[in-house]
Image: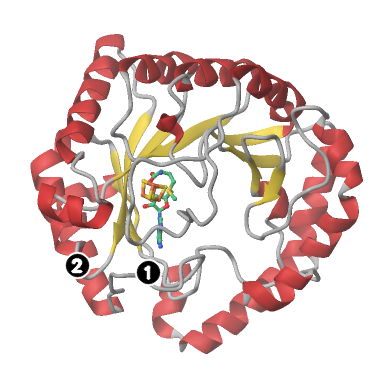
Amino acid sequence: MKQLLRDVLPPETYRSMSRVKNGLMSGHVHRKLMVKRGMGERYLGVRVDTVSACNHRCQYCYTLDLTGHRTQLMPLESFEKVAKNLFPYAHTLALSCTWEPTMNKRLADFIRAAGDFGVPYKHFVTNGSYLTEEMMAAAIETGIDRIAVSIDAATPELYKEIRESDDLEMVLANLRRFQEMKRARGVKKPVININWTAFEENADQAVQFVKQNDDVFDTFWFWHLLPKMRNEVIAYHRMDKKRYYGVVARLKELLGPRLTSSEYNEDQSNKPLGICNRSLENLTVHPEGRIQVGCSKHYLEGNVIEQDFSEIFEMNEALFEQLFHKETEFCQTDCGR
Ligand SMILES: C[S@@+](CC[C@H](N)C(=O)[O-])C[C@H]1O[C@@H](n2cnc3c(N)ncnc32)[C@H](O)[C@@H]1O
Ligand code: SF4
């Protein structure tokens, strides 16, 4: 429906309608979340970066910013405290956000520690090259729901050009091993999803990739390169709608319902337009325990390694209100939505 409206309406009309809809809906969504909070139900979407490093250098990456960067690693003992202080409030948990989770060599222990808090949906996103059998076993045994693996080329040459890394064969071998381990245990989870960030230069290779590597994944996202977020200049080119949907049609023929995301996005990001109701569902924990509201540059007061999130919420209630009404300086000047 959303895509149909996008196709038939002029972009500006679609954007205005979307703003109005979200403006009307967001109060309702926010109130529902507050009711959940009052009733002691889970009301947060949380991502944790246990390490701030990446072994790839994707030319289009909107999060990789190495200016003045210092790698940080969250100790397991700190993660256990974060888990105790935060996970009982979370309906969704990702063990990754901005960086590459497998740069944490003890990720398997972190996955197991995350499994103890009954979070209904657990997942993470990885480039897949450093996934070890230990990590895979931990993910299977802890009931991780989905692992998204970012691949954006079918040939080692293009993969290397995009990522400055020669790892494609290693990633594919890891995924084959992962599927074997799932089969041996008779389980379907984690679902292995390919995240294919698509642009003019790599779109046709998605079809080639699917034909050659159908066995390594369960579901496939064909996801359009976002035109602008943290990186102002991207070396690759966005496709127009016709070209994009031409590739989607070829993928659909091969994948059917396994193609689970193929929306064309004309906006600056994939977040909803209008008044923002997403701040409580977009919390990112950094390795030192500070929490950032993922859609903005705002950091919450407090530290979740030391404090329970109920205390942190109270300290930041005014900021959440401001974000929900889109009243912060960031919302007004930087966000543009
Ligand atoms: C930033 S990465 C972090 C996790 C991990 N390092 C990985 O690559 O899977 C998360 C996802 O963002 C996607 N991504 C990065 N830059 C993007 C952009 N400019 N447009 C759309 N998706 C992008 C990546 O392809 C990846 O699937
Ligand atoms: S692997 Fe992920 S975090 Fe690293 S550069 Fe690529 S998209 Fe960015």
Q: Which residue is mark 2?
A: 201
SS class, disc 1: loop
Q: Residue at x 45, y 54 (%)?
A: 64
Name the spot of residue 137 as percent of width and height, x first.
37, 14
Q: Residue at x 28, y 33 (%)?
A: 129
Q: Which residue is mark 1?
A: 264
| Location of residue 67 with respect to 94 vertically, above or below | below
**Residue 95 relative to residue 57: left or right:** right
Is 66 in front, or is 171? 66
**Residue 41 relative to residue 223: left or right:** right
Tell us which disc is closer to us: 2 or 1.
Answer: 2
- Label 2: how many Cα within 10 Å (few below 14, some 14–19, many 20+): some
Amino acid type shown at disc 1: Tyr
SS class, disc 2: loop
Q: Is residue 190 visible?
A: yes
| Location of residue 52 with respect to 113 vertically, above or below | below
Say whether disc 2 or disc 1 marks the residue closer to the N-terminus: 2
- Label 1: how many Cα within 10 Å (few below 14, some 14–19, many 20+): many
- Which quarter shows the C terminus? bottom right
Q: Residue at x 66, y 60 (%)?
A: 296
**Residue 104 relative to residue 55: left or right:** right
Amino acid type shown at disc 2: Glu
